[in-house]
Structures are given as C-alpha cells and as structure tokens.
Image: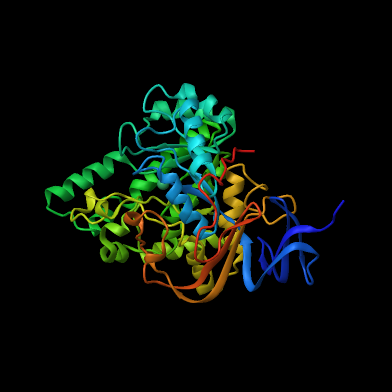
Amino acid sequence: MSTSFDRIVTGTVVTTDTVLRDGFIAIRGEIIAAIGQGIPPQAAETIAMGDKLILPGLVDGHMHTSSSTGWPGIESASRCAAAGGVTTCCDMPYDVPLPVTNAALLRDKISWVERTSHVDMALYGTISKTGGVGAIAELAAGGISAFKLSTYEYDAVRFPRIDHPTMLAAFREIAKTGLPCAIHNEDQELVETLTADARAAGRTDPIMHCRTRPPLAESMADLEIFEMALETGAHVHIAHSSIARGFTLAEQFRGLGAQTTAEACIHYLCMTEADIVRLKGFGKCNPPFRTADEVARMWDCLLADKIAYISTDHAPWPRERKTLDDIFACGAGLTGLQSFAPLMFTLLNERGLSPTLMATYCAERSAKLHGLWPKKGALRVGSDADLLVLEQGDFTFDERHLVDRPEMNWSAWHGQKMCARVTATFLRGQMIWDGDAVLNQPGDGKFVPRL
Ligand SMILES: [Zn+2]
C-alpha cells in the first residue's frame, strides 16, 4: 500500500482554533488525509501557496440561486461560489416558478444541481401556503438540510406567509424530523401599513425602505416564532437578524428550554442606513440595513458567541430590477458569494480579530446547523478536501470581476478596499478556481444530503 498522497497544498493553515505557519494539507482522492506543519510528505503533486492562508472552503448557510431566473440560476450563482471560495451552498427553496414543497420537486432540483452546479449544494425545503404540512416528512426523507418558512408574504405561491395555526402545525411535524426550521422574520401588517403610508405621502426614496421595515417589525416576528418553538420543541432559527435583539431573544428562549438560534448576514456586520441612500436599489435587502450603533451591537453579539453563523443571503437580481426610481419596486437582495471571504477577512482584520473566526462562523457552524459537518466545513482528516486560499494585500473589490451572468454582475461592495482576495478554491481535492478562472464544469458539484 502506498503511503504517499495525491496532492499536497502548503501554506498557512487556518482552522477554527489555530493558525499553523508552514502548514500543509495532504489530499488522497477527494478527502483530507493528513494535516501538518513543517516539511510536507511525498505526494504526486505539491502546490506551494507560500504564506497565503488556507481555510476550510466556506459553507454559505443561506443563499438564493433561483429567485429570479429559476433553476438555471444554479449554474451561474455556483460559479460565483467557486470564485469566492464557497465550496458548499445551502440553497433556499423559494424558486421561480415553484418553491420546493414536495419530494418530486426536490428530486427535480437535485437533478439540476447535479447537472449544473460548480460547487456542492445542500437544499432547503418549504411548505405551500395551505395544505403543505403533509409533505414535511417526505422532504426530510429526501435529504434537505433544513426547512424555511416565512412570516411575510412576497408571493402567495413562491414565497408565502404561513399563518400562525399552519406554522404551529408545521413546527410540530418538523420537530419530529429533528431538522432546523429557518424563518424569514418580518411582521406583515406593520410593514404593509408603513409602506402604504409612505406611498400616500409620496415617499418612495431609498431611506424609506428602512423606515417601513423598522427593528420592531423583526422583533415582533421573532417573538411569535420563538413562542411557537417553545410550545412545539422544534429548532426554530431566525434566517437573518439585522438587530442584536434577535440574538438576545434566541438566547433568552434557549434559557427557557426552547431550541432557538439566529443567523447574521455579513452585510449586517458592516452596512448602515447611509449605504442604502448611497447605493439605492443595489443596497436593498430584507431586513434592511440598520444604524452604525446597531452594527456595533452586532459585533458585540458575535464576540459574545450569540450568533449561530454568518451567511451571505446571496440573491442576484438583474440590474433592471435594482435601478427603478421607486425603492419599493426594486428586487430585495444583494449579491455576496464572491465578496464573502475577502470581506469577512477584512472586517476581522480591521478589528484585530483572528481569521479563525471565519473558519468558525462561515464554515464549521453553518455546516453543523445544516447537518453537513464534519464532511463539510472542516479541516480535519477524513473531511472533504474543500479549501479556500486567501492572499493578503491591498486590493479593491471590483464588480467587473464577478462571474455570474452579465446582468447580475453588480456588488454593493464595488470599489471598496479589501485586504484579501481569493487566489484558489479546491472542491473535494480538485482546484476549481485559480484566481482568474473557474476551472471545473457545470455538474461537477454534487447535492449533499443532511448527514
Ligand atoms: Zn434569504
């Protein structure tokens, strides 16, 4: 039996708890076979990354490939993931024309992933507005990583509001599966009334997006879902808290015995209300950006370990849906897969924090919540050899380098200084991004069922 390895990647290895200078990752087949420091062992191929950082490939626990284009969006969004060092995407179910509400639709989406994705992908499932609770067991059996429901309705079919009695019944069923249930958390009546008032006053300018979706719209929704979590025993997860209060509430309900968690998207750790005024439609997402004081409180939550994980909520819309004069008419969602790693590294670096926090909150924690760890999100012997390689330096993020469809290649971080860039991505042992081009083929990515 040969003791040598197929491939060795040398560099500064960053795990969740340590930074190994002169480190190496040894790969056999698709799997990490050894991790060490110093002179690396023999291998068929050695790729020297110098002093670049080698992290676990990121696991984005929340993103949308198919909100605007349907499943053909899987190919182009996953290309951005490859270029961004995101090796596993957990894709949301609110797809055009139909959301993933039963086992047959799930099988169809899995076949699209396996034909078109550049990276590995886990999938969320959801329920239809009425009569959908009966499909919960078959979706779980089909391998979804989590459920997603909403307290707010964007569309009665694609993205419905689930009323309280239906949500309660759904939580009881979901509790039996042991899967988490992420919730889009905004109060319908409050947002609709404030939006109607703003329109009546002739105010459709960008800041009104923040004014019509105030923090209270989130925290009221958080309380409803957490009360039902306490009642049913289901693991209920806020899909995005833009406010520190969401994390505090999750912690308080855990103290009462509920299984409650909350997630931050990376934009809530840096963007403020001033940014939507500057960016207009390109800064519109739900929930909206908050104040600089709130961003500071979000960091306090992160450092107090109250945040389950950090995601992108990547949701690409074509430019024509982001450049309308009426902010309420613009599509809600940012692009984020390609900026995720350099931005997270930069935000940590600015605060003097270790990149080990990126391995923790953007890989291990999201993989754990989605039942993918330690196959995914880990630099451990036996894990998939999914690697993100970062070069440190002075860079400017440029949306012209995005690799989505041309009409989707815009970024809220265009022109922003960043102190890292992604110079390589490895998926199950193969280099799929070399800093310039995506090297693998559509369909090289696989569906990853919950373990
Ligand atoms: Zn989302």
Residue 311 in sight from this viewpoint: no
Q: Residue at x 29, y 63 (%)?
A: 279
> Looking at this rendering, what residue extends furthest in the bottom direction?
394
> Looking at this rendering, what residue extends furthest in the right direction?
1
Q: Nearer the viewer, residue 95 or 134?
A: 95
Location of residue 113 in the rendering, given as x and y in whole percent from the top left corner: 50, 40
Q: How is the image coloured?
A: rainbow
Residue 210 sits above or below residue 169 on the image: below
Residue 370 sits above or below residue 168 on the image: below
Q: Residue at x 51, y 35 (%)?
A: 111
User: Could you say which quadrant of the image residue 256 lies in?
Assistant: top right
Q: Is residue 331 left or right of residue 171?
A: left
Location of residue 60 in the rendering, given as x and y in whole percent from the top left corner: 52, 51
Residue 355 in sight from this viewpoint: yes
Residue 398 sits above or below residue 366 on the image: below
Q: How many marks?
A: 0
Q: Residue at x 24, y 53 (%)?
A: 320
Location of residue 134 in the rendering, given as x and y in whole percent from the top left corner: 48, 21
User: Could you say which quadrant of the image residue 325 lies in?
Assistant: bottom left
Q: Is residue 56 left or right of residue 230?
A: right
Location of residue 175 in the rendering, given as x and y in whole percent from the top left corner: 56, 30
Quadrant where the C terminus lies?
top right
